[in-house]
Image (tube, grey):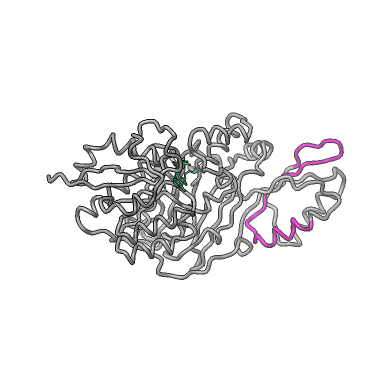
Amino acid sequence: MENRVINAAILGAGTVGGGVYKLAQAMEEDIFHKTGARLVIKKMLVRNVNKERKGIPSEILTDDWNSIINDPEIDIIVELMGGITPAKKYVIEALNAGKQVVTANKDLLAEYGEEVMSAAEKSGNDLQFEAAVAGAIPIIRPLKQSMAGNHITEVMGIVNGTTNYILTKMTEKGMDYADALAEATELGYAEADPTADVEGYDAGRKIAIMASIAFNSRVTFSQVYTEGITKISADDIRYAKEFGYVIKLLGVARNVDGQIEVKVHPMLIDENHPLATVKDAFNAVFVHGDAMDDAMFMGRGAGEMPTASAVMGDIIDVMRDIVCDCCGRIGCSCYKKLYVKKIEETKSKFFLRIKAKDKTGVLANIASVLGNNDVSIAQVVQKRRNSGVAELVIITDEVEEKNFNDAMAIFEGMSVISEIAGVIRVH
Ligand SMILES: NC(=O)C1=CN([C@@H]2O[C@H](COP(=O)(O)OP(=O)(O)OC[C@H]3O[C@@H](n4cnc5c(N)ncnc54)[C@H](OP(=O)(O)O)[C@@H]3O)[C@@H](O)[C@H]2O)C=CC1
Ligand SMILES: N[C@@H](CC=O)C(=O)O
């Protein structure tokens, strides 16, 4: 085997960048045998070159993008900085300069996927992004390649490790939300700004990327309905448990008769459902296709080495393409333009927790508001009665989201209702 060298530069030396550097060292010989070339990490771009980074030689650190983009020996750019600026500019400049690109940046792909994919296609270069969705789990490549012989109608699952970690700790250890978030951040799961995790934006970006590939029609993050876990209380978790459910943050994308439904929100799922067993920072994705039926993918969704594993898989793939001189083989697959529904145009089943005056006729009043808005009740339980206030837990049948919202708006104005304490969709 000839001793060919392929040079790469990693943009970022944080959680994931550091992990990729470590893997490149540990896998050096294997990478050579798997690709026929030696991988050399020639440079790593950071903001602060003076910060010590365990295991990374300081000579390869730089804060000068020009020294990377203008280096003709660098074949692969591995973007692991995150965010839009300057990541978008660097990725597009790299592709236009004839370099292959690997990225884990879901923010960039969910908002500017069309622009960066088109830069890759025009330049005939690789743009690989397996790590952008669900960490170590292979899901982008299966959707683009292995399951390409299907019309995919549904992609759904747990696609954010931080929130799954928080919900698991709150459910199983009664841990406080803030403490669980601090632990997830310490473990390297959370985004630079964890608001993206807890408000559902990170999961929204991932579901937008998967929906675009699965349904062959571009879905951007702005089209995804997102609701996070910040309003989930210990009471919600306890009541869910009493009803035989666990609460998970789910991303759901469906192609219903040629129209796309795409959303992220907390959901009550049956405690015996396979997703209920997906705990801590693990993720799981279900895919339904007309030929294959159901498939489920599960694994670690966040963290240093699991994410580095997915990035390294992409680097190895790109190296093989370079060696075989077949870069740019797999381009954008969004050849349709499907309508993306608004959340009001979809249907859901709801868990509703209401605090109301504990007096005769109130329950009947509540039931009649729901009934008048075509919201039918599947189950109602009266919980605590305290100082003249009763707590009601209602589970509805599947109803139009618009009708449910209309009923909630009426409840807001009713003096007998003191609080709408919890609204969570049910799987
Ligand atoms: N953490 C995880 O589990 C996962 C992360 N991802 C994605 O991977 C990417 C990286 O995440 P992660 O490693 O956690 O992030 P970190 O915040 O740990 O690391 C970011 C790195 O990028 C560098 N950087 C940021 N902005 C610039 C800039 N303008 N110029 C030069 N260097 C810059 C930082 O430099 P400095 O150190 O000097 O500040 C740092 O080394 C993100 O897109 C993230 O969404 C995807 C899957 C999982
Ligand atoms: N913050 C993300 C990291 C991986 O994408 C998560 O928690 O899932």
Please report the residue visible at 84 percent of the width from the left and 54 percent of the height from the top. 414
Q: Which residue appears at 46% of the width and 53% of the height?
A: 86
Is residue 191 in the magenta section? no
In percent of width and height, residue 187 lies at 49, 33
Q: Report the label total.
A: 0
Which residue is farthest left?
1
Is-magenta flag for residue 384? yes
In the image, residue 310 above or below residue 330 = above
310 to the left or right of 384: left
* Residue segment shown in magenta: 382-410
- Given residues 119 and 31, the one toward you in this image is 119
Q: Position of residue 341 (x, y in %)?
A: 57, 65
Locate residue 24: give its quadrant.
top left
> Is residue 98 depicted above or below 158 in this figure?
below
Quadrant where the N terminus is found in the figure: top left
* Residue 5 visible in the snapshot: yes
Please name whichever residue, 374 or 345, is drawn nearer the observer in this view of the structure: 345
User: Residue drawn at (52%, 43%), measured in percent from left and top?
Assistant: 192
